Image (spheres, helix red, strand yellow):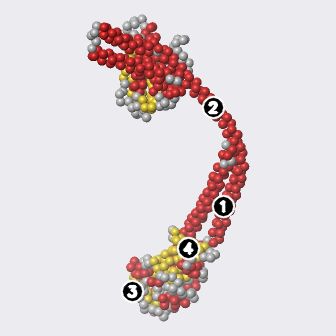
Amino acid sequence: MSRQAGTIRRQILWPLMAAIGLILLVTFFSISYLQKSFVVMEARHHIDQVERLFNGLLEAEAKFMQVRLDTLTEDKVLQKAWLERDRQQLLAVAEPLYQQLHSQYKITHFYFVDPNRTCFLRVHNPARRGDIIERFTMRQAEETGKMSWGIELGPLGTFTLRVVAPWRINDRLVGYLELGEEIEHLTPALVSILNVDLLFRIKKSYLNRSDWEKGMAMLGRKADWDAFDQMVSIDATKNNILKEFLDLQHKTHEAPKNGIIRITTDDKIFMGGLIPLIDAGGRNVGDILVLNDWTSLSNTFQRQTLFLVLLIGGIGCLLFIIFFLYAGRIEQRLVNAFKSLSDKNREQQRTEAELRATQAQLIQSSKLASVGELAAGIAHELNQPLMVLRSKNQLMQRRLQKETLTPEHIGEAIESVNRNTKRMMNIIDHLRAFSRQSGQTEHKRELVQINKVIDDCFLMIGEQLRLRDIQIKKEFDPGLPRIQADGNQLEQVFLNLFANARDAVVEKREKCTDKESCQAEIAIHTGISEDKSHIVILISDNGCGIPPALEKTIFDPFVTSKAVGKGTGLGLSISYGIIQEHRGLIRVAESGPEGTTFCVELPAG
């Protein structure tokens, strides 16, 4: 135990250290996973916020311009100048209105258009006129006869929010009024409200490179047509955001998950995604890149993760020290307990050895008692073949004296001698095997046929039963499987049950006044249980039965219903122990004035 005790600490502490390490790993990966999930969720939330706010601002601006257009279409001075087709007068009246709208509300476009979509006057650019307006908003207003709005991509690569209203005077369509505004002013509003960085990109397929470069120069922005393969940048909230996004092509970055892009530079971490830009015609003409600087929050997460890992590691070290000291005490207690258990175990082994020896002696005494009790019957069994041998011998002598002895007589005599001597040898051999010391046959298990074991019992007790005129009824199932058992021990069990049945029927017959009507009988039935798991043996008699007061204790040692001096009270107790060793069951199935039935069940496997 001393060598094993030295390993107890290791057996306890190594699993503890492994558990602490596993907890640290699980904690680290769980926190990392939760942090990434939170960042992705927040990034997705910011993208959705930008998209909703962007669309909301466009709708609000469009509604404002719709209100202004309603006012303009009702202006009598404008109506008069338009109906008179006086362009100079129309410009003189509309110019102040446009300047007011431009200065106060950032309106950048003001059109008067004929019913055939020919531009009659651009208030913001009077020199340019006479062209056909092919924009989606204009066509939609023409087709529906209602006010329409949407963002339109201009030839210079800029987006304009346009609102077109059919102009009716006296319920007659006289033309169209259009207001528009460049949407660049919405970008600062998005940035200030949501604290994000934005990059607007347009697909090259919708632009003319020369016109776009001129437009970017006019707006004072850097034009880099080759920055992207299929798109160009038209606006960005920071000068370096384009460079940071371009670095995505060259630096290590995570693949988009759930539409989320992660950009990692030397000292920055950006999370974001793309919002499609849909024009008034429903075309996807570009996108808006939404980026959030997550560097500070990521550093905070890393510090928190490090703190938690250090905290759990410190707690683990403290637990390790506590368990190390506590395991030492457990080791000492286990050493003392092991010594005590070893002493008790040796004492128990001695006690069990003495108990087994006592049990063997008890079984042997019960066997010898059974043999002594059955001695008269056995002697009679042996006397019968001896009488046959004597008679045959005398008959042979007489025939020899009369000289009538023939070879046939000699053969018949030899056959009779062989048959009767074999019968005596079987009885003697069976008696010797049955009387053998229990220790010599202990644990001698072999395949036995239960019907044969029961039949062998009658070699010793059969003559006694015949002398007492006890009828034997056998109902044996010939198809019973053989079972693994000690046939010698099982024979002792059945002999005890037959002896008890014999005494019970004799006692009842002695008390019976009409001897001829009191037939004594013992019935033996063998079969197999319904589930085929057990061999079932029923031994019944029509004797006096077991007294009710003894039914629950009948298998206890020294319990007997027989008169003093006629029974030891050990037969059923020994039988109960033998059946238990065979993993079986013995019980009183039925008992009363009409007799008793014992049931023995033995495993069929």
* Comes first in the chain, label 2 or label 4: 4
> Which residue is under mark 3?
116
Q: Report helix, strand or loop for mark 4.
A: loop
Residue 257 image position (x, y, % from top left): 52, 69
Q: Nearer the viewer, residue 171 or 306?
A: 306
Residue 153 horizontal side relative to residue 37, left or right: left
Q: Nearer the viewer, residue 342 or 200?
A: 342
Q: Nearer the viewer, mark 3 or mark 1?
A: 1
The image shows residue 443, relative to residue 329, as above or below, that is: above
Q: CA distance from mark 4 to mark 3?
A: 53 Å
Q: Which residue is mark 4?
A: 253
User: Which residue corresponds to the image point at 50% horizontal and 28% vertical from the top-left?
Assistant: 441
Q: Are marks 3 and 1 in contact (CB under 8 Å)?
A: no
The Cα atoms of the two marked residues, 3 and 1, are separated by 74 Å
Where 210 falls versus 559 (above or below)?
below
The crowd level at tag 4 (other Cα within 10 Å; few <14, some 14-19, many 20+) is some
Find numbered disc 3 in the image and state the secondary structure of the residue it sits on: loop
Identify the mark at residue 348; answer none if there is no mark. 2
Disc 3 from disc 2: Cα separation? 117 Å
Which residue type carries mark 4? His
Q: Is residue 522 left or right of residue 320?
A: left
**Residue under pointer 1:** 309
